[in-house]
Image (cartoon, grey):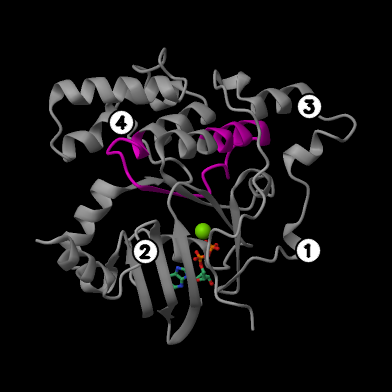
Amino acid sequence: MTPTASAALATSDAPAAENIVRCIDVSRVYHLGGEEVHACRAVSCEIPNGKLIALRGRSGSGKTTLINIMSGLDKPSSGKTFLFGRETTHLNDRELTELRRHRIGFIFQAFALLPVLSAFENVELPMRLAGLSARARQRRTTDLLEMVGLGRRMHHRPFELSGGEQGRVAIARALANEPGMIVADEPTGALDSVTGLQIMMLFKRIVSEKNVTIIMATHDPTISEIAHETLIMSDGEMSRDIPEELQGTGILDAMHMPGTLHGEIEMAASGRGAGLDTRIQKGGPTGDVKLPPLP
Ligand code: ADP
Ligand code: MG
């Protein structure tokens, strides 16, 4: 195929290559006992490559619904979602499964590790499903577990690990097939705030080292200080303005208050507590995620 022909094919309705996800007027309606629940209402946004994106909003605002649509677990009732340039409503279940398996990593709130498998086996499993050779699996699994600071705990089972360590196993597993995007739905919800901060700092480091985009749904205000961009869901609609009710104090702000765990927070933020070498860099809005102009 000539370069001209492939460029022409790429232009049809597809997003620019640097966008991992593009939602155009995405709505999702659930039908429940004869009633309609509008979980997403005309959401439009473009998620660029290589960013940590926070998705905030109160419970029931539509975060999980949107994350499921953005990761190809669900399809919009109306509107379009492009995932790595492919419109999801045009893909059948098998094609979507393939896309997810090879290009998207998932981290769930309770981490969903298999209890009978060791940390190593949990991380290795997606590589087995993808048909990677034993040798490549061994090397990549070891590298990933070392990267998340669990080199010495590889053969522990989940119940022998702390909550934060289980989170790290889930992160390593999400990276198993070298995805272009990781979605994390309230991954720090069950962790204490210092451990949660360590996980967020690890996300930030992964984004810069692995050139992967991470979308993290969370209540935690701290994420807005760390993420490159914060998107807000409110009653199914998306905006960039953080409403007052969500403005609370993040753990990094708490560092400046008397009587808090200064040492621990500083250590987590610097990555030292977890054998990481990332220093905090305040994210702040960069304007990378494109939203339509506000009405
Ligand atoms: P969040 O993750 O922000 O808490 P959700 O996306 O889970 O929000 O839910 C958004 C709205 O959609 C809520 O009102 C919720 O009750 C409703 N909802 C979510 N999933 C379903 C479903 N499978 N069937 C019916 N209603 C649902
Ligand atoms: Mg949710």
Work out whether mark 3 precedes mark 1 in sequence or the reverse, and give the earlier one.
1
First in sequence, mark 1 or 4: give its number.
Answer: 4
Give the label, 1 or 2, closer to the camera: 2
Q: Name the residue tied to disc 1.
A: 244
The quadrant of the image that shows the N terminus is bottom left
- Compared to 135, does 132 lie above or below? below
User: Which amino acid type is marked by label 2?
Assistant: Ala
Q: Name the residue under label 4.
A: 122
- Classify mark 2: helix, strand or loop: loop
Q: Looking at this rendering, what residue extends furthest in the bottom direction?
A: 34
Number of dots carrying numbers: 4
Q: Residue 16 carries which label?
A: 2
Visible residue check, residue 259? yes
Q: Quadrant of the C terminus?
A: bottom right
Disc assigned to residue 261: 3
Report if residue 104 lies within the magenta region.
no
Q: Residue at x 40, y 15 (%)?
A: 151
Picture coordinates of residue 10, whole percent (x, y): 25, 67
Residue positioned 46% across, 42% down in the render? 110
Identity of the residue drawn at 61% across and 55% down:
286
Q: Distance between the residues labelled 2 and 3?
A: 44 Å
Decide which of tag 4 and tag 3 comes sooner along the chain: 4
Q: Give the range drawn in magenta.
A: 173-202
Query: Measured from the top left, where is residue 15 in percent x and y?
Result: 35, 67
Mark 2 vs mark 3: in front: 2
Tag in front: 4 or 2: 2
